[in-house]
Amino acid sequence: MDLTGVYPPIATPFDGQGEVDPRAIRSNVGRWLESGVRGIVALGSNGEAPLLDEGESDAVIAAAREAVPSDRLLLAGTGRESTRATIDASRRAAALGADAVLVRTPSYFKPRMTTSALVSHYTAVAEAVPVPVLLYNYPAVTGLTLSADAVGRLARHPNIIGIKETSTDAAQIAAFVDATRDESFAVLAGSAPGFYAALCLGARGAILAAACVVPRACVALLDAFRRGDHDTARDLQRRMIPIAAAVTSGYGVPGLKLAMDIAGYQGGQPRSPLEPAPPGASEVIRAAFSAIEDHR
Amino acid sequence: MDLTGVYPPIATPFDGQGEVDPRAIRSNVGRWLESGVRGIVALGSNGEAPLLDEGESDAVIAAAREAVPSDRLLLAGTGRESTRATIDASRRAAALGADAVLVRTPSYFKPRMTTSALVSHYTAVAEAVPVPVLLYNYPAVTGLTLSADAVGRLARHPNIIGIKETSTDAAQIAAFVDATRDESFAVLAGSAPGFYAALCLGARGAILAAACVVPRACVALLDAFRRGDHDTARDLQRRMIPIAAAVTSGYGVPGLKLAMDIAGYQGGQPRSPLEPAPPGASEVIRAAFSAIEDHR
Amino acid sequence: MDLTGVYPPIATPFDGQGEVDPRAIRSNVGRWLESGVRGIVALGSNGEAPLLDEGESDAVIAAAREAVPSDRLLLAGTGRESTRATIDASRRAAALGADAVLVRTPSYFKPRMTTSALVSHYTAVAEAVPVPVLLYNYPAVTGLTLSADAVGRLARHPNIIGIKETSTDAAQIAAFVDATRDESFAVLAGSAPGFYAALCLGARGAILAAACVVPRACVALLDAFRRGDHDTARDLQRRMIPIAAAVTSGYGVPGLKLAMDIAGYQGGQPRSPLEPAPPGASEVIRAAFSAIEDHR
Amino acid sequence: MDLTGVYPPIATPFDGQGEVDPRAIRSNVGRWLESGVRGIVALGSNGEAPLLDEGESDAVIAAAREAVPSDRLLLAGTGRESTRATIDASRRAAALGADAVLVRTPSYFKPRMTTSALVSHYTAVAEAVPVPVLLYNYPAVTGLTLSADAVGRLARHPNIIGIKETSTDAAQIAAFVDATRDESFAVLAGSAPGFYAALCLGARGAILAAACVVPRACVALLDAFRRGDHDTARDLQRRMIPIAAAVTSGYGVPGLKLAMDIAGYQGGQPRSPLEPAPPGASEVIRAAFSAIEDHR
């Protein structure tokens, strides 16, 4: 499976009663796919996955699959705190048509999540699930980080094919690339402000909230890099930062959904305890869009 | 509801197939109650709650309720990341007989978990649930902390009756006590090494992993403090540290279960990705028990 | 040397040209001593010690000594990053009349500051200096913490007589007390919000910024505790928090100096890069004073 | 002043009596300069600057200047906690021949080190010192970070010409480059594992502990990058990591000095409280050298 490409981690729109809206998912996905992305990620953090129950999670995957043709990839977030719940969610995702699963590090018992425990966890998942597995490292949320040693060992498993690294630490991204260079394994960037640097270091693509609102800019950046045009890639990187910041560190998922509304997607309100983006966010987001207007 | 007292946050024993073992729960609870504790907490961190599914969670509460007579308290951990899942779990817990629910701060989207968002979340839960609500602040796991301002505001809600504060920060515990002094509201310590200090500052009791293995020592400490015997309380505090550390920072839940096995309870193995306590843990735990042997 | 008591860590007033003002130091010290404090600490963090050169440091100690009679204690902060500079500064302080020296953990090379390195450092200082040594643990500034093991080992040295612990972590304070209970060794609290709890745990006194502005309240708290009047001690603790917070976490040293001005001491401006307290600080400080007015 | 290039932050060798050894400094510097570096940095963290007194600091600069010809650059670390001590040290460094000064952020009073305070501090230094000033951001040591806003504002001062950024955060490095793109201002990497990524993002060079032991590899990496040979640069980056890690995160300054000894420089023992590198470090260092042997 060639993971090279850009993937929007899709937001989960809710209807007026606060229920998952499959129609809006299909509509959004259809439009994202027009921008040249390689596929999408359903049920990532930006999809408010931790706020959905198991049935809703399945509904999101099913709706996404309807909109993703077979030549594009549907990745599904299926990480849970227990190994068995992760396996169960991953199997269901595979049955619903996910091409691969993206499994966040369990973290509740973080002092116990040693390299040994994490390697055992991911190995058990990879053994039990009929589709390939991607690791997902997100230190800012989980408070722990996969070691390069763990990633190197897991990359040798034939059913573990990549990692999303959400930090922008160049040393860490390089270490993951270096630890897996003898394997067929893709490192994907997880933060727009580190996207270009990650590509330089050997990443093959990215899963970026920014790709939900400026997918063409993200694709253009990757294309420029792949044809050796560093200047264009770096310039796009710079101009992408304001909108990328607005929909992540700035206003979070509520900001992402607002930016989607502004950009003509169906975003809507987040689920509680998330609160809607504050007054004034619209203006900031519109200004941020303007820096990258030519690539929306 | 008078919360004054000691509460073991009960471990969840699994049977040979890795399934929740209700019989073992009832057996353990029966023995804990003989030690003079005020009640128990089911589905706390030490109960591996994040590793159980919704059906298992209900089964734990049901089993515990069978073993807890009506003059003792059954508190149930029902925190989820979304407000609606928290309400749903809390209502089910109440229906299964929980006397009150203990709701951990949602934390996945931590930069968005402002005082405003947390006050709204807890208020919505308190309004929707037929039993009283306790807040649960656990910064080491969640990466966020409830502000004294938030606690003070929430304490004014008639259905929010207390907080478990897991840190040992005397300034924070004092701030919570001071912010709620005009209300009927109980601060409960959540870490054995800070138990005595918390009592001095105005806490009414504690929810302690140590109370799963040395409940009599914990009860004796509280009794000594309540009769004004600071020296005895402080001495018990000191002697309790080694075993308390072994079953928390030292070996975590796997260590707690091992210590329970050693002490004659039914602990058993943790659920993956937690790994069993390492070789050598038994000796450390036995040595730690010896420092408080007279109060087991 | 009986360290039991309260110590203001004195601010260093500067004159109109920004130079150390010995006259103002003497004046302030004289007034502090009227309040019943056991002594003072010169050249602590609140004394802007890191902003003074070696000659200025000596001048502060000399001025303080003139104002501290022989039945009160003059402690001098003499920690430097290198062992030899620490020894040199400590010897000079002793020669200038300091009764003991307070030595902050070196921290620039924090990953190298193992228990072994810190024990060697403090032992070398204790061996070389003619007056007793107090350890000084200040994790919020240094980014490292002395382990209870290190403190326990160092307490066995006859020339190491105590520690100032600046955190409010009850578990840590208890661990230091417990690790040194067989020695003649005093744990002193370093933060007002943790003062009362520290006393309960076995601390003998405190070095508190708050003691620069409400010394009588601090002394009264200690006296109440020592006569077994926990209620009064706890009440004073609670009422002391607002002013203590204003002169530390709230506005820092600039706020301390402003509060001193308001209270009739000679505070003045801090040295750059510290900036004067912001507009509005005066009002906050005056309001905070009112909560503890009867003990100023 | 064209800062483009590689700079070893030179270690400070001590003689048998523990005193600064000017002869060894000159010898080392002479050899480093043969490798093609643009200049050197005296009195950085790796020079144990925080462990030297003012007179020793001057002696190091004087010795270095003797060995650095006028067509190479001598940068001197002159950051102190107070603005006036920083100005004083910087003026002395200029008088002793430093071409520019490198000023670490003051950090002791970190909660007060707002963008406003830091901009004022650096502006005052830049105004008062006759040579250009470089900012020095080292969050792992100082516990604070310069904001891109602060760097952007300071870059507009004609006497502030660059920054050493020690973190490997690609987002931060990019933000510094982007915030200063309209100015004549050089961002220099400060960590070998982030060197290549920093160059991609627009950095002009680096100040690297690794350059004290594998200067030719560092220069070759920069040269490869500048001629557009990303593959060679990235390969050198990868092979440089083991030795770079050994002399920084692995064994710190003691390891750097040991590696210098192994590589034929004069390293020697660190000053207390730093302890010599532990047994076994030699073997690790020798193995790390072998990965980059062809570029030593």
Image: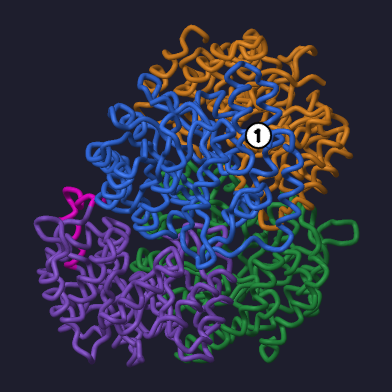
Chain colours: A orange, B green, C purple, D blue
Residue A131 shown in magenta: no
Identity of the residue drawn at 25% across and 80% down: C96
Inspect this view and state whether residue D187 appears. yes
Q: D247 or B77, which lies in front?
A: D247
Q: Residue at x 68, y 32 (%)?
A: A164
Q: Amino acid at mark 1?
A: Ile
Residue A48 visible? The answer is: no
Q: Residue at x 50, y 62 (%)?
A: C144
Q: Position of residue B162 (x, y in %)?
A: 48, 64
Badge 1 sits on which subunit?
A
Is residue D208 shown above or below C13?
A: above
Crowd band around label 1 with a 10 angstrom C-alpha radius: few (<14), some (14–19), many (20+): many
Side of C1 where D44 appears, left or right = right
Q: Residue at x 60, y 38 (%)?
A: D192
Task: Quadrant for residue C77, please give it.
Answer: bottom left
Q: Nearer the viewer, residue C275 or C84?
A: C84
Q: Mark 1 sits on what residue?
A: A173
Q: Position of residue D254 (x, y in %)?
A: 59, 57
Q: Position of residue D216 (x, y in %)?
A: 63, 33
In the image: residue A236, left or right of residue C88 = right
Quadrant of the image occupied by residue C214: bottom left
Q: Which residues are magenta?
A: C272-290
